Image (cartoon, rainbow, N blue to C red):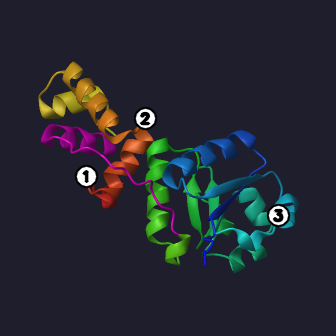
Amino acid sequence: MTVMRQVPAIAILSPNVLTAIGLRSILEKVAPAAETELFGSFRDFEAAGPERFFHYFVTARLFVAHAAFFRERRHKTIVLSSGEPHLAARGMHCLDVRTAEERLVSSLLRLQRSARRPEHALTAPPHAAQTLSDREAEVLTLIAEGLLNKQIAQRLGIGLTTVISHRRNIMEKLGIRSVAGLVVYALTEGYAPTDDM
């Protein structure tokens, strides 16, 4: 007998299409196995059957308008804020959408660790990576800390072109094409401490 495994579904509720698409792109990197759906209104979200979603990413405005619904589902709800979280969202998981991509990824990974149940956790994609050299591991750690190529070169006492070469080698070995992907890999594989993010 074949057992069908349920694909985790994530809902993004935002009338701002660009914000929703950008967040979906990041979530696809952090949780590639999840199915992500975008909703411009609470009515559309309700019609889709909210209980099938493992997580709800909702704008502060929609959260405030439907606070009773989302507070009852606190373990599933992440409020999208623009800077400081809305006062009504106190006690809720919040995500600042105006921050850098690397910081968003770090915040998503923190949310992963605090997920209520294991099946609700966002998971990073597995990488069958080649082994990194010691220097490549150092460069990866500094990338995850948010340093620019020039800063990495100064910190390690090597040339800028050497840093660029190491970075290119790391990306090729890991099959990762973005800085956010490198940060996710560094955090999940222990190259960078998550407490500092």
In percent of the image, x 84 and y 66: which residue is there?
Answer: 46
In the rendered structure, find residue 42 and report the number of the disc placed on it: none
Q: What whole-number distance in Å separates the C-alpha atoms at marks 1 and 3?
A: 40 Å
The image quadrant where one finds the C terminus is bottom left
**Disc number placed over residue 191 in the picture, else none:** 1
- Give the image quarter of residue 61: bottom right
| Region in magenta | 121-145
Residue labelled with disc 3: 48
Amino acid marked by disc 1: Tyr
Residue 145 in picture, x, y percent from top left: 31, 45
For disc 2, the marked residue is 177
Residue 41, horizontal then vertical, whole percent: 83, 55
Specify whether 63 is left or right of 91. Answer: right
Q: Earlier in the sequence, mark 2 or mark 3?
A: 3
Drawn side of residue 128 relative to residue 154, left or right: right
| Nearer-N-terminus badge (1/3) | 3
Amino acid found under the numbered disc labelled 3: Ala
Which of pointers 1 and 2 lies earlier in the amino acid sequence? 2
Q: Note whether residue 100 is visible.
A: no
Q: Is residue 88 magenta?
A: no
Image depth: mark 1 or mark 2 in front: 2
